Amino acid sequence: MKDKRLSVSAIKEGTVIDHIPASALFKVVSILNLDKLDTMITIGNSLGSSKLGKKGIIKLSKVFFKDDEINKIALVAPCAKLNIIRDYDVVEKRVVEIPDEIIGIAKCVNPICITNNEKVTTRFEVVSKSEVKLKCHYCEKITDQDNIVII
Amino acid sequence: MKNKNLVSITDFTREEYLRILELAAEFEAKPRQDILNGYVISTLFFEPSTRTRLSFETAINGLGGRVVGFSDSGATSASKGETLHDTIKMVSNYADLIVMRHPLEGSARLASEVSSVPVVNAGDGANQHPTQTLLDMYSIMKTQGTLENLKIFMVGDLKYGRTVHSLLQAMSKFNPTFYFISPDELKMPPTYKLYLDKTGLNYIEGKDLTEFLPEADIIYMTRVQQERFTDPIEYERVKNAYILRREMLEGTKETMKVLHPLPRVNEIHTDVDASPHAYYFDQARNGVYVRMAILTSILGIK
Ligand SMILES: [Zn+2]
């Protein structure tokens, strides 16, 4: 009994992504391409959180992210926290930060933008981070925080 | 500038703007040269724009180059569902340079990334039309003798008018003072005003066209279109306030010129046409020399 319980609650080596808004959990899974991984992943969602109301958590065994990889989730989970685990201990805590450029994650708000009419990977320059504003590399229009749609 | 794309006016530097204008003046002095002999330039007009296409083709023909292309995508494989990506891949096998106009915004940027030859944007929706901006600058340079420290009035639809936005970006490199005159519904968007604030440039915003006119070096007129208004009564109320008439030009500087990207509807009264301040028809002719300068510098000939 004890062993079974441990296998889902604790990981020996890897990363725990905590404080993901429940509504964004599966977007995070897709942005990080977690469905392509064959290492052990534990996903919990709609867990009670005093901060977020309902939150999601992802535990990834033997997976460590580079900053530019993990920062991609900042668009949907700006408050996410990372715990880096070595030998069952949290050895490092990190927060995510919105990168300067967003590639292939968000949709351009402009309906007559070429990226909404032809198969093109979207690309944005992040022109403001406090209140997120994305400038489309193609049509040069700004997509505001409220209008960000994740592909 | 060899092999550089011209998609957005901000793709070129201040020095490159000045180089283009200098070359345009050379072409104006000597408009027939055989320097594009042996070159093939493709003009792809996915939406019709007779004015712009004729200007480009006159520029190419005047320098002995050959044009292949189409003037309306109805007659091409694009109408059979071919993607822009594939059309550009195919055309860049045949041409040394592509001039493209397309109704979708960002299409020219995409084309420049797909193409193996340089791309010149001849208008992508309401986004950019950089050769228009360079010809506006050439007209300003020709009539004022300089681009520096000018008082530039932008009048009419400042919200949707792409020509004024591009001109603002380009002229900002030459320490101008801008006067934005428009109805409330069509004011200059905050993004551009913020840009001027950051750059440390001055601007004045107003609703009354006649108020500051004696200070103007350049009046850049745009069309106020009814479909831009959410309230038709508001349109009726303001439509006549942004029509330039000859009597308004009394007391303006002698060197002041009125520009307009054309076609005009009624925003400049025809009684202005005979005024020495009217420059909009000459402005259109300047387009050919400016396009000669752009094409030859990108091809590395000049
Ligand atoms: Zn876009």
Image (cartoon, rainbow, N blue to C red):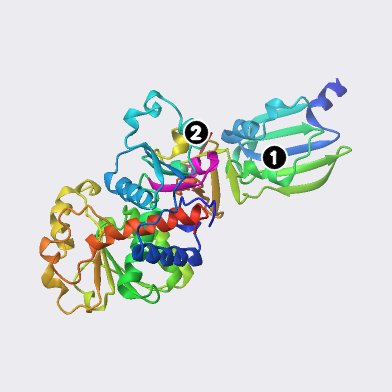
Towards the viewer: A136 or B30: B30
- Relative to B215, is B157 above or below? above
In the shown orientation, is residue A29 left or right of residue B96? right
Residue B261 in the image: state x and y as whole percent. 27, 57
> Image point 51% across, 34% down: which residue?
B89
Circles 2 and 1: CB atoms closer than 8 Å: no
Dot 1 surroundings within 10 Å: few (below 14), some, or many (20 or more)? Answer: some
Residue A135 highlighted magenta (yes or no): no
Towards the viewer: B207 or B255: B255
The quadrant in which residue B289 appears is bottom left
> Image point 13% across, 57% down: which residue?
B237
Residue B214 in the image: state x and y as whole percent. 22, 78
Towards the viewer: B302 or B103: B302
> Image point 49% across, 59% down: which residue?
B302
Q: Are marks 2 and 1 on the same chain?
A: no
Q: Chain of mark 1?
A: A
In the shown orientation, is residue B242 left or right of residue B83? left
Q: Amino acid at mark 2?
A: His
**Alpha carbon distance from label 2 to label 1:** 41 Å
The quadrant in which residue B215 appears is bottom left
Q: Chain of mark 2?
A: B
Within 8 Å of ligand 1, the CB of disc 2?
no
In the shown orientation, is residue A68 left or right of residue B101? right
Residue B118 highlighted magenta (yes or no): yes
Q: Please state, as top left, top right, bottom left or bottom right, where the N terminus of chain A lies in the image.
A: top right
Say what secondary structure mark 2 lies in. Answer: helix
Find disc 1 in the rendering and name its residue: A18
**Residues drawn in magenta:** B109-123
Which disc is residue B85 wearing? 2
Say what secondary structure mark 1 lies in. Answer: strand
